[in-house]
Image (cartoon, coloured by chain):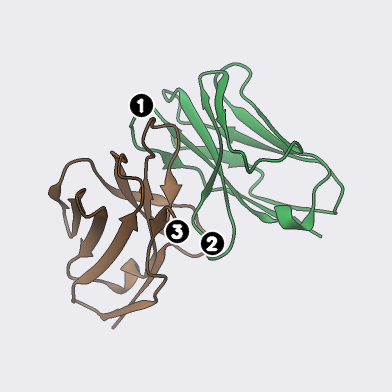
Amino acid sequence: DTGVSQDPRHKITKRGQNVTFRCDPISEHNRLYWYRQTLGQGPEFLTYFQNEAQLEKSRLLSDRFSAERPKGSFSTLEIQRTEQGDSAMYLCASSSGQAETQYFGPGTRLLVL
Amino acid sequence: QKEVEQNSGPLSVPEGAIASLNCTYSDRGSQSFFWYRQYSGKSPELIMFIYSNGDKEDGRFTAQLNKASQYVSLLIRDSQPSDSATYLCAVTPSGGYNKLIFGAGTRLAVHP
């Protein structure tokens, strides 16, 4: 499978715990994006990497959220001290260049109890 | 005003009919426009993109863009029950291509 992959696909955690998600983009894509989607809404932009550099971060992203892409390949998204409002589908997408189409991974569905 | 607006639906069409999905956007500087299909519980799947005013056809799908009216649409010809899904309109904001701004999606139901 040469598409975008995400791990885990599902995560259930208790409020206050930390969680980390991983995204592996399409191999030749240097741009990687994280989005969050809640029921009945479209995906909402969280952050964007070009190679290993995090170039944009949504103002909606609280300090509890951090993302990395240390070697310009896979990326991780960590949520510290999770809250029930963090329950959502976390989507990763990648593209090969400016204005190129973004291809989404299967997503990680997070449920915070 | 939301940046990208879509009618939430459901839009119900009979099998074989043309389904017309509409989207308006507020950023006049937006340059790239995308339609994604999302089945329940799945991630968005790219259907089409369009950059220039006019029509762009790909199989049963036609995207239409009118930048003056800030309007983009998707036509699905010969609709099939397998087309039943939520269709998301997305645009790139002016000043960069570093993210997509999505509408909330239109739910399409194609009945036999």
> Which secondary structure, mark 2?
loop
Callout 2, which amino acid?
Gly
Q: Quadrant of residue B111?
A: bottom left
Q: Quadrant of residue A95?
A: top left
Which chain is in green here? A
Q: Nearer the viewer, residue B30 or B12?
A: B30
Q: Residue at x 16, y 55 (%)?
A: B59
> Which secondary structure, mark 1?
loop
Q: Residue at x 39, y 51 (%)?
A: B45
Left or right placement of residue B110 versus residue A4 in this view: left
Q: Position of residue B2 (x, y in %)?
A: 45, 57
Q: Quadrant of residue A28?
A: top left
Pointer 2 residue: B41
- Chain letter, disc 1 residue: A
Up/down of A91 relative to A40, above or below: above
Q: Residue at x 44, y 62 (%)?
A: B39
Instruction: Sort mark 3 into few (<14), some (14-19) or many (20+) by Cα contacts within 10 Å.
Output: few
Mark 1 to mark 2: distance in Å?
Answer: 29 Å
Pointer 1 residue: A98
Labelled disc at residue B1? 3
Mark 2 to mark 3: distance in Å?
Answer: 28 Å
Q: Quadrant of the C terminus of chain A?
A: bottom right
Callout 3, which amino acid?
Gln
Q: How many marks?
A: 3
Callout 1, which amino acid?
Gln
